[in-house]
Image (cartoon, rainbow, N blue to C red):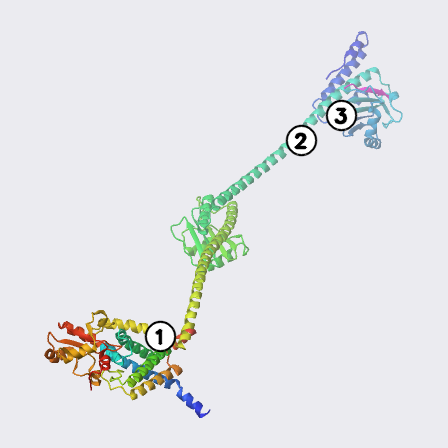
Amino acid sequence: MQIDTSQWRSASDPAQKTRGELDRRVFFLETLLETSRELDGLIQPKRIMDVFLLMTMGSLGIGTGLILLLNTRSRQGSMLHRGIPESEATSLQQNLWPIYEQFYAQEAHPGLTCCVPKILNRDSLPEHSPLPGQTELVVLWNISQEYCGLLGLGRKISAQPFEEDDYSLLSNLINILVSALSHALFTQNIQQLNAELQKQNIRLTETLELAQHARDDLDRRVHHLRSLYELTAELSPIAESQRLLEAFLLNILGTFGVKGGFALIYERSAQTVKTVARGTSRQLHIAAKEADKLFYRCLAAAAKRTMEPLTVSRLQDPQALFGELDLGINMQTAAMLVVDQSALGLVGLGPTLAGLPLADEEEQLFFAQAANFMIFFRNVRAFETIQCLNEDLLQANRELKQTIADLTEARHTIKVLERAKTALKGVLQRQADRIGRASVLDVSLILLAALILACTFNYANPHGISVLPQAIVQEPPAEIDAVTARALQQAGQAVIVDARPPEFYRQKHIADSVNVPAALFEIIYKMKLTRLVNAETVVIVYGRNISRRYDEHVGQLLMAREHDKVRILSGGLRAWQQQGYPVRP
Amino acid sequence: MKFSGRLWNLVTHPYLVLAIRLYIGGLFIYASMYKINYAGEFAETIAGYQLVPYWAVNLAALVMPWAELICGLFLVIGFRTKSAAAIIIGLLALFAAAIAISLMRNLPIGCGCFHALGEQMSWRTLVRDLVWLALAVYVYAFDSALQIEKNLFLSVREL
């Protein structure tokens, strides 16, 4: 705080002034010191203004006074007064801003600057001042561009006018006030800032806590999502429902650190149950009928009794539900899965490695993974169905190809059969025609068959005959005419032999001829011819017709008996008769 | 129905024709037996007729009995009865002609129909052959019963 003492020094220069003058100055200085002490340590502007107003009024001996502190930015202010009626003070309180405009407008007081108070006596006051009528002195001061103030003082109790020393004291007091208010406002600002900062800190702390919660929540969600992602990555490449079930259970057990559990899928339409159990040495086997009953019990114990597709329901008291499965696992958590109307699933989990059931969040993740599994299971089932359909389609294609090949072959066969049928029909028609009539072909065939059979039988028959007569291939004996033959007969040099069968001989023959048919040649030759014929005798043989050359045959037989003079009668019996030679009978 | 019609029906009755067919068939089977076994003697018989060229006598003696046998069998079993009857008709006509010629020639031979040493050929023999010829024609004209071939054909057609 600076106190202008130059005036006091100038006043003290005439050292001869009276002691009263010095006392008064001492009083002023003490007033300033006391005011400064009183104001020092105060941080409430109103309190400062109140103390200042009392100190100033007291030190100057003034009965009424007021002090204003205005905020030019907020256009608000505070006022303290002493000795002013309350009604008037209230009016002033309601017209603070007009006071400011009247006294602090630049046009009105262009000389008013910061930190330099301006004192206006009654004569300098505006005519229509809103200040109380008893106001004798007004001091304007600025604390900063934001805050300014006004001190209004009434007349002295002593009714003396204000002197120069009063102005000087007042100016110094105002400086002290300004300094104190500046400090107080600054302190107040700092306090406000501190309070604001504390509020901000509290909000920041709350925000940090929220952020921590959000982070924890995010971590949980990340963990959930990672678990779901890992489950998805593990289940994605699997295309077989049994393997999918096994992979799902293993993933669940690994994710939650569960000692053991089981999972089963019951397909009601196909009446098949797929099961898998881990963490136990016992096998899980369950028939379709038992699975049906088990699912009815589970539906009764489910938290959500619904058969809506892709629904996961928590099961109450899993140990009681699955006790009869006898897996040796203390079931803690279980869920029923409704894949669709025809496929239901159960998953039961034992305690974690810490021996505890799944926490709520873990349970939620477990249900989410179960829901994820159901989607995969449905896809795999659809894939299996498609695969089955594809296999059926391939089989049908193969069968169709085979059928087409068979049909093609059958068509070919039918064509062949058609041709055969046509040919057969023709044959049948011809045969039918032949049945009703005699055909040249049939006759020819019968004769041909007779010829073949005859030749074959004759060839095999020891009494068979030659097809052609021997006379054709053998050299016939020389011929002799009837005249010569008659002459030789009459000369007794020849014997005439009739070679025809006996019945022809008996019918007519040359006189004195001997009947020697070929069939009886051996007998007759020995009995007759050996007596009639010798080496010089000419044997004349006759007898032939269109069908037989008996003479040649017998002539050959005689020549075979070494008869060299064997002759054939030329013209036979007819030529003999034509010559008129004798015949018998 | 008129008497003539009933008589015609009676005469042309299938079973009557069948009986005649069996008779003719059996007759020819019987006649062929001896000729097949004694072809040489049958050849002499043929030669006795003096109608067949000497180079064809043996061949005719071999083939003719087998033709008789086959035709006789066909008539008995009812197979190709028309053709068999036609051949028998031809043979009987041939025999009748040969007998007639031989009778006119006054050849001293037997007919050789069944045995080489049979009875002497006579006009009675010719009449008998002509009767058989008429029966063969009758069979050819009216035979329809128990034809194995026809039954077989009907079965095939039904199939």
Instruction: Name the residue beneath numbered marker 3.
Output: A146
Q: Is residue A37 above or below residue B89?
A: above
Residue closest to the eye, B49 or B148: B49
Front disc: 3 or 1: 1
C-alpha distance separating marks 3 and 1? 155 Å
Magenta region, residue range? A115-121
Q: Which label is found at residue A330? A: none
Chain for disc number 3: A
Residue A520 visible in the current orientation: no
Answer yes or no: do the residues labelled 2 and 3 have beta carbons within 8 Å? no
Left or right: A470, with A168 as reference point: left
Q: Quick check: A98 left or right of B133?
A: right
Label 2 secondary element: helix
Question: Residue at the location (29% across, 72% down)?
Answer: A451
**To which chain does the residue with label 2 belong?**
A
Q: How far is mark 2 from mark 3, CA to CA? A: 20 Å
Q: Secondary structure at mark 3?
A: loop
Mark 2–mark 1 Cα distance, whole angstroms, equals 143 Å
Comparing marks 2 and 1, which lies closer to the viewer? 1
Q: Is residue A210 left or right of residue A108?
A: left
> Which amino acid does the dot numbered 3 rest on?
Glu
Quarter holding the C terminus of chain A?
A: bottom left
Q: Which mark is residue A196?
A: 2
Q: Which residue is mark 1?
A: A443
* Mark 2 in CB contact with mark 1 (< 8 angstroms): no
Q: Nearer the viewer, residue A266 or A366?
A: A266
Q: Is residue A219 visible?
A: yes
